[in-house]
């Protein structure tokens, strides 16, 4: 396309987005009139117009009028106004998501032979242009590994029923692009959308109770059923298409490199509701989902594979397999395929029956059921070969091969389930068991070296540690039951269903050894007579705080130096998983230091792994919000140092990120396509990783910047005695815990200490109050410590931004946070602080740091305004702010009223409800929670 054509296409595309927003906005206006009369619409419009005018030009008298207008709303109107703005944002978000799908289709339709940046085709084209042979490309593909892990972290503020309505609205709005619609069809579509928005208006946004863990499991499974079972194989198919295009002389079958895992039902850290029984129920639900998906697909196949032996000859192998099925599988008459001339339909009927029998515990070990996913795969391969036998290759490629890929990806367990627990729980259980066995009286009081020596000996010793004659506390029994459940699961669903056991707050090598000793106790780890170690479960350290990151490489060095532990790694293909926490490290040290220390830790751990011949798979615990490492999936992959991805990458997908990326098939496909492209690009960059002299100098500069930034951050967060009170009083932190968005408590312990507060409510509360403090605070002071108003130093920072991917990612993350933050509105929240001296002092520090950070970001990027280089996002924030602002002002007013009432020992459920509605609305408006 010419530049003029591209510009015209973008302009037309943006017009369609504005059309959709205006269309949905008008429908919402009709709903407001229908539900609350023209008075309600007039109030909403007046608030909106005033807010918009204030954003265009801040006038003190208009500002006072705006606040008075909000304060004078009666309870009923205020409630409706909050909902009107909140639902408007939901509709705008739907329009923007649809527009992403439209833009991709527009590009593909008008690009001709051009290859879209960030696409799989562009990544494969780069391989070809770099001169890589098909053998070298195969080597790269064999090493690729990306696992995306869904978590139940409570940051999805919307109910499932609301998301279902959104999906229906999205599909209807997308239909507006159909040029063949008649006038009547368009009118019917508008009527349908009007009904959907009325349904949305009359559906409660708030949960009346906290979801149970199994509720969260069902929510997670929704995305597999609706999206991932269909989209993930398509991504593989596209990669194979591109490989065949650029390397046509080779027959390609891409190995499994991209898969999904889950924590939902396995993450018990701080969540007493996740028991061993809940984990087992989760696995059963996941298996049932996979089997039902396969049955649904095979019923469709029965409709398609109508090949008749009156016309074609099927393979002898297929005929023999049908006879084998007949001899052992009993079909009800209604399930039989009566036309003996249609063998594929007969075969599929038996396959569906064998899948049904998998769920029958009485048939375990019987020949009329599949014992594993491999049995289903074998039958599919028989069908595939037979189709090719009579030259129905296209049918095999487009139907059977896709299902074979689905079975490869999802097995009989849908997703690998990770188990996570806090290190202290293992230590407590180990202390009790060792005391009862008279091995050591007080294990917890041993030195770290003493624990390591003892645990290594126990791991080497084949004798059991527990006795059925001992009585254990509930905590210890549950700890042991979890490992027994994992063993049972691996036997029932295959070893791939659970392979990783994550240890929160890992602070020593003993934390991993404790888990391996428990694994040995139930047979997940064993040492054979010949010395060979068999291990089907790996202990995965989670390094979260700054101190933990500092200690990480030494901890792994100690473990790899232990022969028995090193042997367990050999038993897992010389691969070890390491998890890095972005949330707690940021909460602990601020955005600059957290990102720097994560980089340092990754490099140091990788060096230890290389020394011992161990490949490392880094598991990045990123949240959705900027203050928790949030960024687009492809950028998070490319942000890693190339030499650290050799063993693969895992990344958490949390809360609202899951729904925004995977609720629509088109968006899910594009996200996974970009992730695949980034993975190939990162692997290509890692073929010849070279650290330049400039990069070593830049590392030194960032190290110094980080040290200054850390001091600045911790002076406020940890060393100011009034800070935590300021935080609780000037944000909706206490009320966030009443939102019922997750089964997990917001604190690890029932305490008001800052260290026991989880990172999610920490970030959530700052986002709601428009500070976004965790994502930018102390960055300005750190950068200024190097810049020092010297032009030559600014030149270096600009060069780093241009040529150093780590620094560019860091600056762009801070820039995004500064763009979304609003210190004028944040000041309204600070007015709720009871200690006026502390309020003025702390807010003053935050405001001063914000101005400095913004000023330096502009100097480094060379932009006139924040986000000038990303005009789409800049425009989206600019257009959203006037609609978010009224919700923020109303939230401050409501919080003040509610807290005053509670101070008097009173309460008001309707007032709390309005507060929670503003939280939902602001989350939708900013497209971020925690």
Image (tube, rainbow, N blue to C red):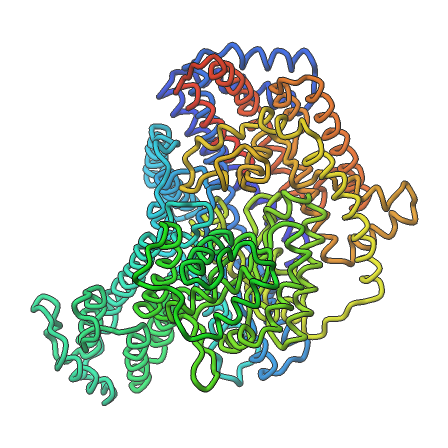
Query: Split into 4 quadrants, where in the image is the C terminus?
Result: top right
Q: Position of residue 413 (x, y in %)?
A: 35, 64
Name above or below for residue 687 compared with residue 742. below
Residue at the spot x=49%, y=19% of the render?
Answer: 44
Residue at the spot x=61%, y=26% of the render?
Answer: 725
Name above or below for residue 27 compared with residue 266. above
Q: Position of residue 896 (x, y in %)?
A: 54, 17
**Quarter of the image holding residue 574?**
bottom right
Residue at the spot x=64%, y=76% of the render?
Answer: 612
Most distant residue in the left direction: 333
Count of residue discs: 0
Q: Position of residue 653 (x, y in %)?
A: 50, 52
**Quarter of the image holding residue 730?**
top right
- Front one among 250 and 445: 445
Name above or below for residue 852 compared with residue 1. above
- Front one among 746 and 824: 746
């Amino acid at each position: 396309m010419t530049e003029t054509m591209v510009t015209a296409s973008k302009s037309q595309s943006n017009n369609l987005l504005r059309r959709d927003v205006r269309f949905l906005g008008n429908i919402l206006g009709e709903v407001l009139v229908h539900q609350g009369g023209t008075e309600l619409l007039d109030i909403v419009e007046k608030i909106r117009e005033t807010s918009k005018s204030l954003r265009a030009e801040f006038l003190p008298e208009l500002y006072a009028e705006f606040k008075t207008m909000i304060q004078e709303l009666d309870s009923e109107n205020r409630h409706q106004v909050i909902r009107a703005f909140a639902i408007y944002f939901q509709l705008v978000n739907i329009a923007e998501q649809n527009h992403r799908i439209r833009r991709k289709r527009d590009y593909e339709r008008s690009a001709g032979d051009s290859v879209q940046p960030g696409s799989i085709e562009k990544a494969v084209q780069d391989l070809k242009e770099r001169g890589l042979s098909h053998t070298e490309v195969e080597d790269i593909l064999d090493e690729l590994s990306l696992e995306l892990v869904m978590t139940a972290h409570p940051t999805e503020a919307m109910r499932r029923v609301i998301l279902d309505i959104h999906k229906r609205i999205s599909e209807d709005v997308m239909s507006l692009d159909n040029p063949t619609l008649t006038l009547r069809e368009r009118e019917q579509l508008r009527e349908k959308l009007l009904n959907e928005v009325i349904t949305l208006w009359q559906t409660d946004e708030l949960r009346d109770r906290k979801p149970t863990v199994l509720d969260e499991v069902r929510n997670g499974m929704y995305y597999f059923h609706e999206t991932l079972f269909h989209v993930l194989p398509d991504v593989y198919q596209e990669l194979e298409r591109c490989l065949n295009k650029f390397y046509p002389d080779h027959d390609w079958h891409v190995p499994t490199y991209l898969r999904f895992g889950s924590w939902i039902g396995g993450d018990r850290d701080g969540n007493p509701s996740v028991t061993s029984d809940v984990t087992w129920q989760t696995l059963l639900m996941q298996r049932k989902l996979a089997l039902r998906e396969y049955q649904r697909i095979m019923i469709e196949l029965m409709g398609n594979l109508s090949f008749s032996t009156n016309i074609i000859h099927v393979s002898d192998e297929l005929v023999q397999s049908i006879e084998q099925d007949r001899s052992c599988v009993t079909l009800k008459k209604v399930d039989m395929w009566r036309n003996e001339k249609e063998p594929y339909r007969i075969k599929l009927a038996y396959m569906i029956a064998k899948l049904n029998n998998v769920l029958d515990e009485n048939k375990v070990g019987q020949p009329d059921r599949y014992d594993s996913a491999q049995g289903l795969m074998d039958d599919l391969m028989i069908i595939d070969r037979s189709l090719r036998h009579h030259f129905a290759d296209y049918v095999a490629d487009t139907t059977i091969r896709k299902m074979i890929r689905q079975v490869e990806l999802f097995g009989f367990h849908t997703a690998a389930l990770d188990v996570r627990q806090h290190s202290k729980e293992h230590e407590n259980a180990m202390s009790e068991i060792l005391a009862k066995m008279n091995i050591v009286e007080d294990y917890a009081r041993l030195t770290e070296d003493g624990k390591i020596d003892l645990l290594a000996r126990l791991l080497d010793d084949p004798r059991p540690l527990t006795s059925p004659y001992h009585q254990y506390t509930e905590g210890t029994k549950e700890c042991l039951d979890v490992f027994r459940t994992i063993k049972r699961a691996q036997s029932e669903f295959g070893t791939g269903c659970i392979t990783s056991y994550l240890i929160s707050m890992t602070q020593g090598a003993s934390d991993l050894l404790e888990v391996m000793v428990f694994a040995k106790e139930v047979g997940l780890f064993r040492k054979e007579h010949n010395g060979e170690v068999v291990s089907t479960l790996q202990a995965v350290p989670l390094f979260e705080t700054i101190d933990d990151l500092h200690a990480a490489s030494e901890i792994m060095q100690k473990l790899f130096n232990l022969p028995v532990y090193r042997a367990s790694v050999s038993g897992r293909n010389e691969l070890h998983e390491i998890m890095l926490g972005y949330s707690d490290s940021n909460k602990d040290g601020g955005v600059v230091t957290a990102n720097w220390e994560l980089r340092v830790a990754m490099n140091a751990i990788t060096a230890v792994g290389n020394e011992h011949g161990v490949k490392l798979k880094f598991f990045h615990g990123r949240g959705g919000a900027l203050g928790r490492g949030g960024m687009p999936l492809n950028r998070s992959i490319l942000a890693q140092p190339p030499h650290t991805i050799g063993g693969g990458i895992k990344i958490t997908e949390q809360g609202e990120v899951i729904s925004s990326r995977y609720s629509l098939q088109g968006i899910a496909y594009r996200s996974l396509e970009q992730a695949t492209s980034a993975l190939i690009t990162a692997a290509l960059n890692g073929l010849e990783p070279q650290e330049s002299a400039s990069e070593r100098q830049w590392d030194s500069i960032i190290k110094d910047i980080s040290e200054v930034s850390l001091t600045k951050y911790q002076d406020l967060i940890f060393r100011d005695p009034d800070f935590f009170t300021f935080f609780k009083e000037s944000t909706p932190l206490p009320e966030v815990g009443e939102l019922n968005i997750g089964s997990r408590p917001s604190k690890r312990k029932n305490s008001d200490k800052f260290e026991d507060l989880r990172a999610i409510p920490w970030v959530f509360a700052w986002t709601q109050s428009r500070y976004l403090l965790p994502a930018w605070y102390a960055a300005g002071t750190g950068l200024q410590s190097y810049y020092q108003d010297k032009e030559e130093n600014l030149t270096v920072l600009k060069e780093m931004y241009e040529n150093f991917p780590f620094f560019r990612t860091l600056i762009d993350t801070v820039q995004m946070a500064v763009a979304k933050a609003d210190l004028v509105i944040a000041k309204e929240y600070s007015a709720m602080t009871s200690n006026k001296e502390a309020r003025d002092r702390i807010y003053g520090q935050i405001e001063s740091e914000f101005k400095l950070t913004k000023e330096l970001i502009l100097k480094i990027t060379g932009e006139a305004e924040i986000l000038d280089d990303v005009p789409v996002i800049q425009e989206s924030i600019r257009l959203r702010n006037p609609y978010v602002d009224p919700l923020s002002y109303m939230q401050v007013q409501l919080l003040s009223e509610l807290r005053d009432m509670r101070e008097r020992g009173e309460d008001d459920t309707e007032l709390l409800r309005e507060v929670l509605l503003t939280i939902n609305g602001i989350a939708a408006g900013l497209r971020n929670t925690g």
